[in-house]
């Protein structure tokens, strides 16, 4: 906004019975600066993600919005519940575009099946009270089973002895056992042929 400010000399000269006309003008420019009076706000309180075991790469993203037009939002992962090193091993977030990626693949059978961590969105300027300059959202990642294990026989070799006299239809020769480490029903069904 630009204003024109005028100042005049109001001295009245009694001898000549008139007011001298002295004035000065100046332009005043006022720049209105936006303060950081809004916090970023996530579009969701909780973000749910599903990922198959043995997968690396992008998982998904979160999103925060800030009503202050001058603010740039950056993102970071803040682990909790004593999972700091575990979360850092498996997840990372792009600080500018909020894409969460998997660093290290998960193993459903021997590892944790869900992860819970907090993402923080921060704006780039000091906040004006009551704003605090950041927001938090929860991320929950569910690891899904994949058929990634071969069936294993309980023994390396099976030997059965039978005599001709005892053989009849449906005669039980012996038992063979095998297991599959995959946990989900459709991933560990075994068929013997």
Image (tube, rainbow, N blue to C red):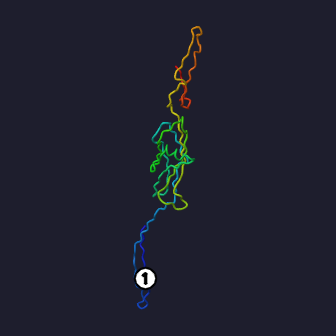
The mark total stands at: 1
Question: Can you give x and y, in whole percent of width and height, for residue 176 in the image?
Answer: 56, 21
Question: Can you give x and y, in whole percent of width and height, for residue 8 in the image?
Answer: 42, 80
In front of the other: 8 or 145? 145
Identify the residue at horizontal 40%, vertical 74% (top origin): 26
User: Relative to residue 40, is residue 14 depicted above or below?
Assistant: below
Q: Which residue is at the far top?
A: 165
Identify the residue at horizontal 50%, vertical 30% (top origin): 149
Q: Which residue is at the far bottom?
A: 15
Mark 1 secondary-structure assignment: loop
User: Relative to residue 134, is residue 161 depicted above or below?
Assistant: above
Locate residue 159: give its quadrant: top right
In front of the other: 32 or 133? 133
Q: Quadrant for the N terminus, please.
A: bottom left
Residue wearing tag 1: 9
User: Relative to residue 160, is residue 23 depicted above or below?
Assistant: below
Question: Can you give x and y, in whole percent of width and height, for residue 2 in the image?
Answer: 42, 68
Locate residue 18: give its quadrant: bottom left
Question: Can you give x and y, in whole percent of width and height, for residue 61 in the image?
Answer: 48, 45
Number of residues whose C-alpha sits closer than 10 Å to that of mark 1, classed few (under 14), some (14–19) or many (20 or more):
few
Identify the residue at horizontal 40%, vertical 80% (top origin): 23
């Amino acid at each position: 906004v630009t204003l024109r400010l005028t100042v005049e000399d109001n001295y009245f000269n009694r001898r000549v019975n008139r007011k001298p006309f002295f004035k000065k003008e100046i332009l005043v420019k006022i720049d209105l600066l936006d303060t950081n009076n809004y916090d970023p706000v996530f579009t969701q309180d909780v973000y749910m993600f599903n990922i198959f075991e043995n997968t690396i790469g992008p998982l998904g993203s979160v999103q925060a919005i800030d009503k202050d037009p001058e603010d740039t939002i950056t993102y970071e992962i803040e682990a909790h519940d004593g999972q700091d090193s575990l979360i850092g091993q498996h997840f990372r977030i792009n600080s500018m575009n909020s894409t969460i990626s998997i660093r290290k693949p998960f193993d459903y059978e021997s590892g944790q099946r869900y992860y819970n961590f907090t993402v923080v969105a921060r704006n780039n300027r000091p906040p004006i009270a009551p704003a605090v300059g950041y927001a938090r959202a929860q991320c929950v990642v569910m690891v899904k089973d994949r058929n990634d294990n071969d069936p294993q026989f309980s023994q390396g070799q099976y030997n059965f002895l039978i005599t001709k006299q005892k053989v009849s239809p449906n005669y039980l020769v012996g038992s063979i056992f095998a297991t599959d480490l995959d946990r989900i029903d459709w991933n560990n069904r075994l068929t013997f042929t």
